[in-house]
Image: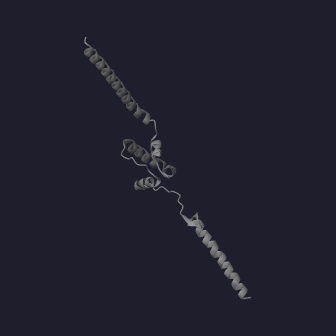
Amino acid sequence: MTEEDKELELLKAKRLLEMQKNISQKQKTEELKTNQPATKSTVSPREIVVKNLGYRGLEVLENAEAQFPGETRMVVEKLAELLQSGEVTEIIDGGKLLTLFRSVGIRVKVQTTIKVEQDGKLVSWSDKLRGESDELKEESKIDNLDTLHENP
């Protein structure tokens, strides 16, 4: 054999080795892909949904589960299917989840508070109204005392 033939055989052997490595890597990745659905099925639908919840989403989900356990389970299972299939890709915040429940007829009640700014602090609306009513009571007491002192 000539020197060129030896080099050509060496290059062919290297190329063959690279191709075998690529084939084995592809087989390994395919095996992992086929094994992944089996591991995904062990994850509960609720866990899949919880991983995709955003701001106040978990709070709405827990309220729905407490108030409507059977109906919520069905919605969560379907939502998990949509998340797994890729039809739903966005993060689901509390407002979106609440809208979803209401669109299927599940009226989930969520505790809400309205906060307003008073003297540089956030105060609940009910506390602010209570504070104003207390001020009015104090003013009326002072007015009553003034009228009593004027009319002895």
Q: Which of 99 and 51 is in front in this view?
A: 51
Q: In which quarter of the image is residue 121?
A: bottom right
Q: Which of 120 and 27 is in front in this view?
A: 120
Residue at screen point 55% across, 65% down: 116
Residue at screen point 47% across, 53% down: 94
Residue placed furthest toward the front: 3
Q: Is residue 103 above or below residue 45?
A: below
Residue at screen point 41% across, 33% down: 36
| 146 sits to left or right of 23 | right
Marker count (numbered): 0
Q: Quadrant of residue 106?
A: bottom left
Q: Quadrant of residue 5?
A: top left
Residue 26 appears at what percent x and percent y?
A: 35, 28
Residue 9 appears at what percent x and percent y?
A: 28, 16
Q: Nearer the viewer, residue 135 or 29?
A: 29
Residue 141 appears at what percent x and percent y?
A: 68, 78
Residue at screen point 48% across, 55% down: 108
- The answer to whether residue 108 is seen in the rendering is yes
Q: In this view, does 40 lie above or below 93?
A: above
